[in-house]
Image (cartoon, rainbow, N blue to C red):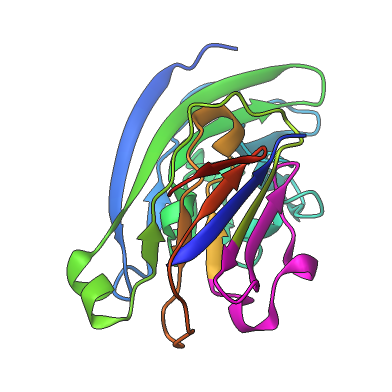
Amino acid sequence: MFLLFLLLMNVSQHALAVEVEGNAEAESVQLPCQHSGFIPDDNPTVTWTRNDLDPTTVHLRREEGDDLKGQNRRYSGRTSMRPDALDSLDFSLTLRKPRLTDSGKYSCTLSDGREERQLTTVQLQVKADREKVDSGVQSVQLPCNTTLHLAEGAKVEWMDSGDHWVHVFQNGLDQPVEQSQDYRGRTEMYANLVRTGDLSLFLDPQRETQTSTPAASTAGRETSC
């Protein structure tokens, strides 16, 4: 059990849905994007984005190859496209080791640096495998939702009963420097919590941590999650 502290501080042509179970057997999932039209002669660029993240870039492909300097760090080392994507017109994105927090709406766009055309939007839903959760392999969800209006800079702090920082999230990003060493690499939150009010925490339970009765404080008020 844990304590939660909240400190308040162009149109798509195709819409697709992809569902996958987030477990050890799901090595990857493919987000489809096929193009049958014109490719710009000058600096053609295919970009996969997720607008509820900051930065929004999931993967970017230029004529000379991938350009991942601006990639959101959540996807580092987990995305790829066909080497011949701009020749084959198959802009599908492969996402390795899908996580629950990868759920969201992804957009595939084509541009020449001046004009941008949205080709596809894909709604990815990564579902927890209940059997894997019970066996201790998959992460577990600690659900928490709020109806409060959250500012863009809202800071969310999950703590255990020993006053250890389980997870800290602010300005659309995790803050691992504030996190207790015991929990590093074991926790995730949804990136769009400001818009949805979903403050749920995903915890990898591989290591046991002593906890006790939970309580929560929301802007000075006691709440329970």
Q: Which residue is drawn at 62% across and 19% down?
A: 117
- Which segment is the magenta one? 159-186
Q: Which residue is drawn at 40% across and 58% down?
A: 142
In this view, 48 is above or below 165: above
Query: In the rendering, at what x and y percent does residue 69 appear?
Result: 82, 54
Looking at the image, which is closer to me, 1 or 122? Answer: 1
Query: In the rendering, at what x and y percent does residue 23 appear?
Result: 32, 69
Total numbered circles: 0
Query: In the rendering, at what x and y percent does residue 156 appear?
Result: 65, 48
185 in magenta = yes
Looking at the image, which is closer to me, 135 or 200? Answer: 200
Drawn side of residue 8 relative to residue 5, left or right:
right
145 in magenta = no
Q: Which residue is drawn at 68% across and 39% down?
A: 56
Drawn side of residue 174 relative to residue 83, left or right:
right
The quarter holding residue 188 reads bottom right
In this view, 11 is above or below 40: above
Q: Can residue 50 be seen?
A: no
The quarter holding residue 21 reads bottom left
Looking at the image, which is closer to me, 113 or 189? Answer: 189
